[in-house]
Image (cartoon, grey):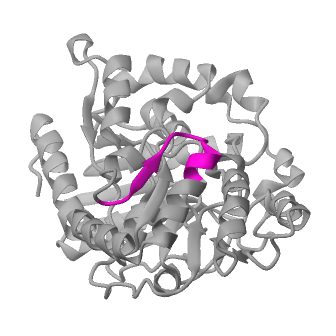
Amino acid sequence: MRIRYLVRFGYGINGITRSVITQANALAAAGHQVEVVSLRRHSERPHFRLDPRVRMFPLIDDFDRDPSWWETAAALDERSAPLLGSGHARLKPPQRFSELEERECARYVGELRDGVLVTTQPPLSLFAIRYGSPHFVHIAQEHVNYDFYGQSMRQLMTEHFGKLDAIVTLTAADAAAYRRAFPADRGGPVIRQIPNALHRWGFPPAPLDRPVISAVGRLQHEKGFDLLIEAFEQVAAAHPDWQLRIYGAGPLKPALRSMIEQRHLYNHVLLMGPSDDLDAEYPKSSLLVLSSRYEGFGLVLLEAMAHGLPVVAFDCPHGPGEIIDHGRTGLLVPPQDVAALAAAVGKLIDSPELRAELGAAGRRKAERYRPEIIARQWEELFAELLTARGIPPG
């Protein structure tokens, strides 16, 4: 099969790109012809390892510009994408798609005549619906929960997503939300849940003998690191020999650093910055905490579980509750309940036996998300949709 993924920032460090490259690598290993098309390129090569059998190229090459240009007011030099309307034009540049991006997407999808195209954000999906030909199967892979899109974007989705062949969500809860929004009895597209895959499998279990807690994610509001620091203040008071390491970059770094200093946690909470090799970092800790206010999935939970780390997470919408079996493969606490989060972390600190038990059970569950297993789910969906169109899967 010929399979194409369209992403916005395929050369950067972000969760969508990481999951897409994992899928692309697994499908290429299974013998398919796979391309990853990046709307923009701002570095020489992709950050994540790309199988040499996967072709990757950009539609707009920003390599000579400052890599952070799109997070600044400099992006205002590009007018907002007309298709997305005036409400979209009021967004800040990082969230806003430009007229240039719409035009380049239109040019690319207008030339496609075969295979499968997987778009990875609603604006990309809308561009492909509007400007693409009817000669390829089009799947929208959703990485953000439906309920978190604004009213104007949901209205555009309501008007146009019925023309998709399928919508794929990361969680069952989100699939249910899309089925309510796009009912099958009204001609809605196929709705399927396929989770993210682990990028690798086969790590030795972490020793779980270090007084270190890990947290991973972009330093922004939805990841809830402010809540985690607040919770760890309680943990550190009872367990002063333990340390919290937060891996990631983002706009809230100054505010989080200020929180740490105000609470005199500078010896206990470390902002580690982004890591090029989290697989080398996970075994240095004895548990992982996910403090998100909401999640599209929660891939870092699975990554930690694959290393045999016990995990603690807020039971936020939607991913953690579908990954963690509370009390068996990890611990879930009520969303944004700082005291409960601190208590759950303290419980694992106090019990090496429970850490080992949950870590081993979590590792067994994580095996279900091996890349070749998830790739087979994608292959089955591609074959189903191509056959429904009367196109040989190839």
**Picture coordinates of residue 250, whole percent (x, y):** 74, 61
**Picture coordinates of residue 161, whole percent (x, y):** 40, 26
Is 335 within the magenta?
A: yes
**Picture coordinates of residue 216, whole percent (x, y):** 58, 66
Is 218 within the magenta?
A: no
Region of the chain picked out in magenta, as a range: 329-341
- Residues 383 and 127: in front is 383
Tell me what residue is drawn at x 44 percent, y 46 percent: 109
Picture layout, residue 200 above or below residue 67: below
Q: Could you tell whether 222 is left or right of 69 in the image?
A: left
Q: Quadrant of the N terminus?
A: bottom left
- Residues 91 and 288: in front is 288
Q: Dividing the picture into quarters, in which one does residue 390 lie? A: top left
Q: Quadrant of the C terminus?
A: bottom left
Q: Could you tell whether 289 is left or right of 25 in the image?
A: right
Residue 27 in view here: no
**Picture coordinates of residue 267, whole percent (x, y):** 79, 79
Tell me what residue is drawn at x 19 percent, y 49 percent: 382
The residue positioned farthest toward the top in the image shown: 186
Q: Dividing the picture into quarters, in which one does residue 64 lie? A: bottom right
- Residues 103 and 33: in front is 33
Tell me what residue is drawn at x 48 percent, y 78 percent: 286
Label tally: 0
Residue 359 in view here: yes
Q: Could you tell whether 187 is left or right of 105 in the image?
A: left
